[in-house]
Image (cartoon, rainbow, N blue to C red):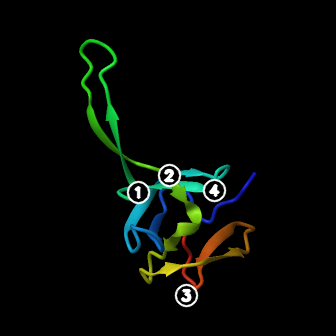
Amino acid sequence: MNKLHVKKDDTVVVISGVYQGKKGKVLRAMPQEGKVVVEGVNIATRHTKPRRQGDVGGIIKSEAPMYASKVMLLCPKCDKATRISYRILPDGKKVRVCKKCNAQID
C-alpha cells in the first residue's frame, strides 16, 4: 500500500498549478492513486441530465482529485507550508513534526 504525507482533515496549501497558493482542508485521501481531494480546490463542472421524472438536471460543481505531490501540509503553529518529519515519543507513539518550527502536528 502506498503512503501519503497528508491525511483526511489536514489543512494544506497547493504549491503548483492553477490553484497555487490556495489553502483548504483535505476531504478525502486516496493512497492507492496518490491523490487527495481538497476543499474549494480543483473544481470540476459536470453537466447532468435528469434521468427520472422529478429529477433536476443542471451544472454540478464539485472538487476533483489532485496529485498529493502538489500539496504541502500547513503547520498550525507557524502557519507556513512545511515538510514533515516523524518523531517517536517516549511512550512509543509516532507523531508528525514541522520541519521549520519543530511543532507537533498531530
Q: Which residue is under mark 2?
A: 65
- In the picture as drawn, the residue positioned furthest to the top comes out as 53
Give whichever of discs 3 and 4 has the lower sequence position.
4
Question: Are the two marked residues, 4 and 1, in contact with CB atoms closer than 8 angstroms?
Answer: no
Image depth: mark 1 or mark 3 in front:
1
Q: Is residue 66 left or right of residue 31?
A: left
- The disc, 1 or 3, on the residue closer to the chain's N-terminal end is 1
Q: Give the Cα distance between marks 2 and 3.
A: 28 Å
Q: Nearer the viewer, mark 2 or mark 3?
A: 2
What is the number of the mark on residue 100?
3
Q: Give the vertical position of 28 relative to 58 (above or below).
A: below
Gap in Å between the C-alphas at discs 2 and 1? 7 Å
Q: In the rendering, which numbered label is found on residue 71?
A: none
- Tag 2–tag 1 contact (CB < 8 Å): yes
Labels 4 and 1: the sequence-earlier one: 4
Q: Position of residue 76 (x, y in %)?
A: 44, 75
Q: Residues under labels 2 and 4: Cα distance?
A: 10 Å
In the foreground, 44 or 77: 44
Q: Is residue 45 left or right of residue 30?
A: left
- Give neighbour class at mark 4: few <14, some 14-19, many 20+ (Cα, 10 Å): some
Say which element carries label 1. loop
N-term-proximal mark, 2 vs 1: 1
Q: Does dot 2 land on a helix, a strand or a loop?
A: loop
| Disc 3 secondary structure class | loop
The correct choice, above or below, for 82 with respect to 39 in the image is: below
Can residue 81 be seen here? The reply is yes
Quadrant where the image shows the C terminus: bottom right
Residue at the spot 36% in from the left edge and 45% down from the top edge: 62
Q: Nearer the viewer, residue 42 or 88?
A: 42
Q: Which mark is residue 34?
A: 4
